[in-house]
């Protein structure tokens, strides 16, 4: 009898869609996909048998640590100190998730306040939130935040310029966020060498926001971006996506005019983990504070005069009643952000500088080794790169990667998968764990492939 009302509601919904049965609802799915026959599951197994099967299946994977790896393209191979997971898995943190009751969540609230403080100092802006889902959602949320603040005063209302070389997966998320809000996306042109076209950038003056990345998708540190704020004007939000590790040696965007800074926090606290869970950073100037998405922890004093922490400024609807919120992020990656905070605290300013120098050194050493191979060149030999650089190959990048894979090397990323006309471009990524042996393996593999192409 308890199921009868549910069946009635089901039939009511079907009729509202002009259907009479559940078969009608799934009619567009081919019969062979619906798998009406029983699935070919094995018979019941013991725990030992299940564990053996799981190990066999997992053993077929090739991780970034199993062989020399130069694959980056958004997520970085990194070294996470064992202290990070040891501290993050303490019960005091594992059991603290949604700190709406500050009187019982002071430990987690303080940890998140420290996270915000470190992110703020890292990017050179006064305010940061507790984290986003990843860099792509952070970028999309930054754009919608900027439009909410600037569209009334902007000469080009609801218009946002986005770098020509924003990775397609990130651009897809940005479009998903902006299309329903009526935000028009326009392209911010770059030159053939990957650097921004400052003359073209003048057309973005007076729009709601401009989104660029430093370093770019090609790992280029573009000095021209430091002039961008003066070109687009004070009423236009300059949004900058960053490689957080690079800020150990590169001037923070807040120092050269950025209004909002976003990025992938993953290099601090957690490995690539198959694409998730990870977390994004988000920081801004005070002008955008009231429209900033996500949680914000504030520091104050309680009735006894003791230091206290609490969620502040954003409303609870921001997190649990999305239809009334200015942002559709209803949570954040709290535990992963905590791991990032622990990692940053363990590094400290000097440790972060050393980490960035190690990545920069491995980038330069790899670049020099590869451009010494006849037939391989850079689009811009004078460019300064961090973590990644793009090579122009004499043949298809996909063929080179297959050859390298057979030689036991993960050689990088085929940029032809992102942009038409770049099928001969290979994006090579490095990290603090890249060794001289790794570089030699990549160089030898590419040299033997080039020799075959030339023949």
Image (spheres, helix red, strand yellow):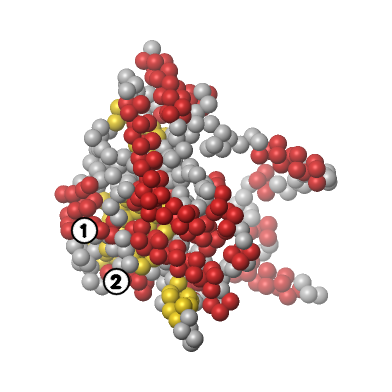
Residue at x-position 41% and y-position 77%:
313
- State the residue lying farthest toward the top: 455
- The image quarter containing residue 1 is bottom right
Distance between mark 2 and mark 1 Cα atoms: 15 Å
Residue 315 screen position, x and y as percent: 46, 77
- Taking 135 as reference, is 100 above or below it? below
- The residue wearing badge 1 is 229
Which one is earlier in the sequence, the residue at label 2 or at label 1? 1
Q: In this view, does 283 lie to the left or right of 88?
A: left
Viewer-proximal residue among 138 and 171: 138
Q: Residue 417 appears in which quarter of the rendering? A: top left
Q: What element carries label 1?
A: helix
Mark 2 crowdedness (10 Å alpha carbons): few <14, some 14-19, many ≥20 = some
Vertically, is 34 above or below 93?
above
Would residue 214 be found to the left or right of residue 7 on screen?
left
Looking at the image, which is closer to me, 308 or 163? 308
Say the numbered circle drawn on residue 287. Answer: 2
Which image quadrant is residue 446 in?
top left
Please tell me whether mark 2 sits on a helix, a strand or a loop: helix
- Can you give x and y, in whole percent of width and height, for residue 343 in the image? 48, 54
Query: Crowding at label 1, few (<14), some or many (≥20) Cα neighbours within 10 Å?
Result: many
- Residue 400 visible, this angle: no
168 and 349: which one is in front?
A: 349
Q: Which x, y percent locates residue 421? A: 33, 34
Query: Residue placed at 66% from the left, 36% from the top?
Result: 59
């Amino acid at each position: 009898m308890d199921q009868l009302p549910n069946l009635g509601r089901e039939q009511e919904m079907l009729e509202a869609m002009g259907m009479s049965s559940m078969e009608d609802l799934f009619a567009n799915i081919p019969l062979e996909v619906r798998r009406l026959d029983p699935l070919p599951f094995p018979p019941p197994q013991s725990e030992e048998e299940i564990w053996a099967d799981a190990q066999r299946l997992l053993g077929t994977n090739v991780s970034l640590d199993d062989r020399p790896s130069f694959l980056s393209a958004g997520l970085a191979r990194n070294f996470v100190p064992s202290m990070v997971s040891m501290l993050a898995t303490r019960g005091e943190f594992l059991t603290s998730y949604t700190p709406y009751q500050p009187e019982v969540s002071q430990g987690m609230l303080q940890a998140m306040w420290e996270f915000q403080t470190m992110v703020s100092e890292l990017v050179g802006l006064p305010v940061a939130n507790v984290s986003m889902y990843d860099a792509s959602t952070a970028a999309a949320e930054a754009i919608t935040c900027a439009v909410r603040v600037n569209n009334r005063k902007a000469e080009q209302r609801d218009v946002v310029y986005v770098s020509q070389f924003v990775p397609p997966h990130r651009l897809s998320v940005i479009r998903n966020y902006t299309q329903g809000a009526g935000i028009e996306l326009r392209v911010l042109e770059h030159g053939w060498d990957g650097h921004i076209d400052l003359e073209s950038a003048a057309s973005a003056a007076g729009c709601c926001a401009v989104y660029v990345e430093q370093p770019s998708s090609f790992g280029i540190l573009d000095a021209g971006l430091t002039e961008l704020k003066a070109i687009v004007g004070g009423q236009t939000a300059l949004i900058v996506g960053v490689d957080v590790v690079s800020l150990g040696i590169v001037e923070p965007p807040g120092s050269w005019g950025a209004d909002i800074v976003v990025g992938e926090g993953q290099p601090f606290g957690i490995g690539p983990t198959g694409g998730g869970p990870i977390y994004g950073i988000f920081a801004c100037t005070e002008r955008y504070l009231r429209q900033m998405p996500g949680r914000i922890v504030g520091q104050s004093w309680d009735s006894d005069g003791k230091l206290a922490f609490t969620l502040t400024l954003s409303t609870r609807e921001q997190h649990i009643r999305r239809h009334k919120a200015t942002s559709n992020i209803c949570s954040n990656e709290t535990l992963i952000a905590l791991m990032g905070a622990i990692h940053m605290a363990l590094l400290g300013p000097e440790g972060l500088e050393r980490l960035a120098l190690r990545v920069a050194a491995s980038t330069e050493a790899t670049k020099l080794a590869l451009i010494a191979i006849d037939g391989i060149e850079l689009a811009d030999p004078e460019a300064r790169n961090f973590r990644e650089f793009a090579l122009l190959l004499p043949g298809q990048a996909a063929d080179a990667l297959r050859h390298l894979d057979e030689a036991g090397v993960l050689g990088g990323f085929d940029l032809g998968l992102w942009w038409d006309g770049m099928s001969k471009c290979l994006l090579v990524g490095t990290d603090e764990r890249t060794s001289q042996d790794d570089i030699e393996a990549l160089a030898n593999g590419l040299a033997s492939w080039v020799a075959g192409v030339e023949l």
